[in-house]
């Protein structure tokens, strides 16, 4: 159909509508010439595809490949520390992984991993690592993990389940680049994941110029959450 034939057709459409609404009863008052269709205004070439194109999604930023076991778990760990006049680097095994009595199947830790570790200190570096992976699945109502003597004092009271493996996994807190003693409070957050279950471990570290040594001053027990 040519553009030239459109005004007449539009006039035939407009007249009955206006009459039906009671607004016009004289079709002669509607001049088809008054109805203008500018083909140039609706030309598809005038639409800029870039203006309607949605945002680009980088597949790397979209975490949709969360697979593996979905068994919930707990982590009991030393969450409060005091560093007195400490410089240099050190590490300790400080956490236990628990398959609580509410579980229904063994806790397979084959895919256990540290997702991220962040801190708000401008200079020091704090890390949370899986130094030794789990040797076997943790039965329901049991725990597993290596603890340093200092961590054991605070963490063990948080764990009522028997520890079937006291050597693995070994989850360690490491720190370095403490080049000078200062008075400060440092917040560290570690995120661990096993399959589709994830747990967040917040730490509060007190740096002090008074005295010498590292002391664990508290512990906590946290529950994993499902990512799906």
Image (tube, rainbow, N blue to C red):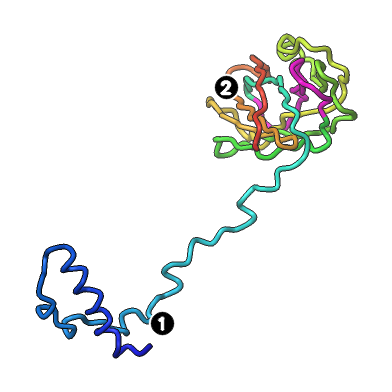
Q: Is residue 82 above or below residue 8?
A: above
- Secondary structure at badge 1 equals helix
- Secondary structure at badge 2 equals strand
Residue under numbered circle 2: 208
Give the residue displayed 64% in from the left and 33% down from the top: 178
- State which region is magenta: 86-107
Q: Is residue 87 magenta?
A: yes
Which mark's residue is nearer the viewer, 2 or 1?
Answer: 1
Residue 125 badge: none
Question: Residue 112 appears at what percent x and percent y?
Answer: 78, 35
Give the residue displayed 29% in from the left and 90% down from the top: 4
Residue under numbered circle 1: 45
Q: Is residue 76 left or right of residue 29?
A: right
**Nearer to us in this view, 66 or 32:** 32
Give the residue displayed 58% in from the left and 18% down from the top: 210
**Nearer to us in this view, 17 or 117:** 17
The image quarter containing residue 151 is top right
Of all residues, the one furthest to the right in this rendering is 135
**Nearer to us in this view, 12 or 220:** 12
Q: Is residue 14 above or below residue 100?
A: below
Question: Residue 214 appears at what percent x and percent y?
Answer: 68, 20
Q: Is residue 216 left or right of residue 43?
A: right
């Amino acid at each position: 159909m040519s553009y030239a034939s459109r005004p007449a057709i539009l006039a035939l459409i407009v007249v009955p509508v206006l009459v039906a609404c009671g607004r016009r009863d004289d079709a002669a008052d509607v001049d088809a010439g008054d109805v203008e269709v500018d083909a140039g205004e609706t030309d598809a070439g005038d639409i800029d595809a870039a203006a309607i194109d949605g945002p680009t999604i980088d597949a790397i930023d979209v975490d949709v490949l969360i697979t593996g076991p979905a068994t919930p778990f707990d982590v009991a760990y030393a969450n409060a520390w005091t560093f007195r006049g400490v410089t240099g680097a050190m590490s300790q095994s400080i956490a236990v992984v628990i398959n609580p009595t509410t579980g229904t199947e063994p806790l397979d830790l084959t895919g256990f991993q540290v997702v991220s570790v962040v801190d708000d200190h401008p200079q020091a570096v704090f890390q949370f690592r899986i130094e030794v992976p789990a040797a076997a699945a943790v039965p329901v109502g049991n725990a597993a993990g290596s603890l340093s003597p200092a961590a054991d004092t605070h963490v063990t009271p948080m764990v009522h389940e028997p520890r079937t493996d006291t050597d693995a996994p070994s989850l360690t807190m490491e720190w370095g680049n403490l080049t000078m003693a200062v008075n400060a409070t440092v917040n560290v957050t570690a995120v661990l994941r096993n399959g589709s279950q994830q747990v967040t471990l917040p730490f509060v570290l007190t740096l002090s110029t008074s005295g010498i040594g590292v002391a664990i001053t508290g512990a906590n027990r946290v529950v994993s959450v499902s990512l799906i």
